[in-house]
Image: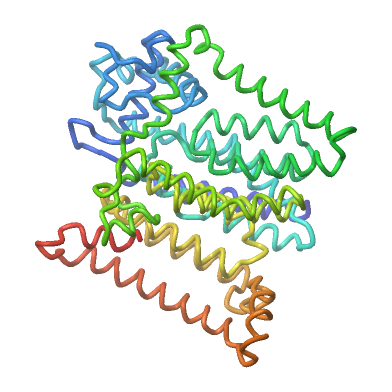
Amino acid sequence: MEKWYLMTAVVLLGLTVRWTVSLNSYSGAGKPPMFGDYEAQRHWQEITFNLPIKQWYFNSSDNNLQYWGLDYPPLTAYHSLLCAYVAQFINPDWIALHSSRGYESQAHKLFMRATVLIADLLIYIPAVVLHCCCLKEISTKKKIANALCILLYPGLILIDYGHFQIMYNSVSLGLALWGVLGVSCDWDLLGSLAFCLAVNYKQMELYHSLPFFCFLLGKCFKKGLKGKGFVLFVKLAGTVVASFTLCWLPFFTERAQALQVLRRLFPVDRGLFEDKVANIWCSVSVFLKIKDILPHHVQIIVSFCLTLLSLLPACVKLTLQPSPKGFRFTLVSCALSFFLFSFQVHEKSILLVSLPVCLVLSEIPFMSTWFLLVSTFSMLPLLLKDDLLMPSVVTTMAFFIACATSFSIFEKTSEEELRLKSFSVSVRKHLPRFTFLPRIIQHLFIISVITMVLLTLMTVTLDPPQKLPDLFSVLPSP
């Protein structure tokens, strides 16, 4: 690629921003007895290093599942074990069984932050750079600008380098992105393998599973299920089975082992949603307490049905008309359906929607920038809890400036550039003077930005009403 030195500068800038954010506070810093997600990741290293595999997911005197028990897939556990070996080499006290709980020191913080940065360098950032280099019909300058905006997306940086999420989002999202690149470039087996690894690293990658399945199935149909399509289908099935088998092999020795892992991965007993998550259920609960009205099993059924209904049209279309562009937009649609309607949603799950939106940033820059700004704002209660207000403001402003200057987003609000021409044409059949949709969207964007600023100021400076103590923490989310 031409001007490779500019892409190198962009990567270095992205790394600098990440490391700068990592100098701030993190989840649960100095807050016993549970501390926070930082301690959860350290504790998983302690457990995987000191206990045999068959005890990793089971409650015992050495592994109290109530204290940050392992509840992510096997690949996450293997990654924790790898980090634990490095920690053992540097300072065994960091992962000493029992006695290391709540361990906090500058040296250990440096180590933990470094593990995130190395994962980014090895998996996520190369995938982003390759994705941007493979973009068609745009100039080298736009490819570099696209990489800059994606690498500066504040939501992922603030969660992985500020909050310190339980397991690194950059790994699961990076593997998913390698999967997108693979199947989009007709490296279907490699793409399937990468995505299977993503699911085995973080079960929430199931948000992206249906678009992968439908896109690959559509490819098989297109090639003909009685010829090359059938061969491709068999190869894909073999790749999926083999990758899952290898990841889960240590847990297949006993049926109880596999079942316990599944119970830990899908904790439906936690309820419909957690904390102040910006999805339908949390928004509705402000007025209607669904958790109290509907029985637990009914909540699961309703959630499943609404999720399926909302994502079905896009998946059917992708199966019948498979294309890389349709695949990217279906990833956005399905991930958003899961986030809005599925069961047991966490506020950080918005990152699973944000990654596909980053992939269409060059195609619909105005709408993508708007969504990515709002997605970061929706996590404000969590970020404030971790004293990350200043990094949030600075990184969000940097991202907005990068997008506004790189894509001239305010100049690209025509019906064609917003991908709303077909909708506007259908409306004009009944309302011939309906020509002001772009202006409405521009005004809505300005109003939303002003609203986000005002809500942030209210949350930081004012005390909520005594009768509604959670008011300010709920408002940014829904």
Which of the two residues, 42 or 394, is positioned nearer the viewer here? 42
* Image quarter hosting the C terminus: bottom left
Kindly identify the residue that appears in the image at 26 percent across and 49 percent down: 293
- Name which residue lies at 63% across and 35% down: 195
**Depth order, front residue of 467/45:** 467
Please tell me in which quadrant of the rendered image residue 259 appears: top left
User: Residue 94 location in percent, x, y?
Assistant: 32, 20
Location of residue 380 (image quadrant): bottom left
**What residue lies at 75% left-to-right and 59% top-to-bottom?**
140
Q: How is the image coloured?
A: rainbow
Q: Position of residue 179 (x, y in %)?
A: 67, 38
Say whether residue 52 is left or right of residue 78. left
Task: Count all numbered tags in the image, as a single digit.
Answer: 0
> What residue is shown at x 23% (from left), y 62% (from top)?
472
Residue 294 left/right relative to 22: left
What x and y, as percent, mark residue 475?
29, 63
Position of 448 with respect to 28 (left or right) is right
Residue 462 in the image: above or below residue 307: below
Q: Position of residue 427 (x, y in %)?
A: 63, 81
* Residue at the far bottom in the pictured view: 433
**Foreground residue, 178 or 279?**
279
121 shown above or below 384: above
Single out the residue that lies furthest toward the right.
Answer: 227
